[in-house]
Amino acid sequence: MYNVSISLDTSGGFASDWVTEAHFGTNMLFHTDRTAEGSDFRSVIESTGVSYIRYPGGTIAEQFFDITDPDATTGTNVIDNNGDTRNLETLSNFVNYCDEIDANPVIVLPTYRYFDETTRQVRPEAEAEYKDFIRALLTDAYGNIDTVTLELGNEWYQTRFDWTVEEFAEFQATVAGWIDEVAAELGERGNVTLLAQAGRNDTTESNDMLAAAFQDDPSLIDGVITHIYGVNNSGDPLGIGGGADRRLDMISDVWSTALAAMSISQSPNGMWATMARTIR
């Protein structure tokens, strides 16, 4: 393994840090990728040596991942209601694979399926189902888990999700509270990195609203995530340009100020183009 030293030109001079394996990872799509011996996915992991693996993927986590039955081998899209049914890689297979190769599991938790579009509130069954899942996960019901990173949903702002910024802000703060509670009860809170979603745009408004939901208890979360893609809609790899820097700086500034973070450091940053900066 190699460590690479980088320097950043800042207004205060130069700051430096190390680029390590913690800055790279890969996205596993549980409706197509497989962990079995001889699979293309295994070959990619072996070739790249990445140690952070995100399961079950991005939007498919919202569509197909049922935390009441995470070892289901098939799942139906409950978000788009199009009857699409897929064969799935089970959570146990994923957890055991990570344990086998000493990888760091990152799990995306579904969110929108637990939002009631009529009442505009969290569904009544949500608390028990989230807590049961977290309790089972942290007591090794799906395989040995030493540490785990949990993401609260994926790209909450997609048009297929019918909620406002305020509604999602309240939702993810509520779910974060449940996860924090169960992990603390089990004595596992220090082994869980819980990441909330940031706002999408370059303006501070959505990030202000999302961060404000955690101001009463910022210790509920350990960092925030956003999605930055390496190409624009035309496939131009330079299309994101300086816009990415402005967006990341804005998110960092807003959330750090809102949550009174004393310092910000880089947390595992996967190849799925998610940025996480710790605030705890």
Image (spheres, rainbow, N blue to C red):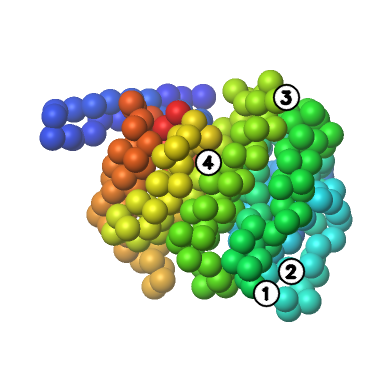
| Relative side of 5 to 21, left or right | left
Amino acid type, label 3: Leu
Q: Is residue 240 left or right of residue 22?
A: left
| The label number, if any, that marks residue 195 in the structure image | 4
Q: Amino acid at mark 2?
A: Asn
- Which residue shows up at 34% across the image and 32% down it? 260
In the rendered image, which quarter is residue 124 located in?
bottom right
Q: Residue 118 versus residue 98: which sits nearer the camera?
A: 118
How far from the left and from the top, in percent, is residue 14? 18, 27
Q: Residues within 10 Å of mark 1 (few under 14, many from 20)?
A: few
Q: Circle 1 sits on which residue?
A: 80
Q: Nearer the viewer, residue 106 or 177?
A: 177
Determine which of the numbered discs, if any, sits on residue 77 in the image: 2
Q: Nearer the viewer, residue 218 or 44?
A: 218
Q: Earlier in the sequence, mark 1 or mark 4?
A: 1
Separation of marks 2 and 3 at Cα, in angstroms = 32 Å
Marks 1/3: CA distance? 36 Å
Residue at the spot x=49%, y=31% of the render?
219
Q: Which of the numbered marks, if any, corresponds to residue 186? A: 3
Which of disc 3 and disc 1 is earlier in sequence? 1
Vertical arrangement, residue 161 with respect to residue 50, above or below = below
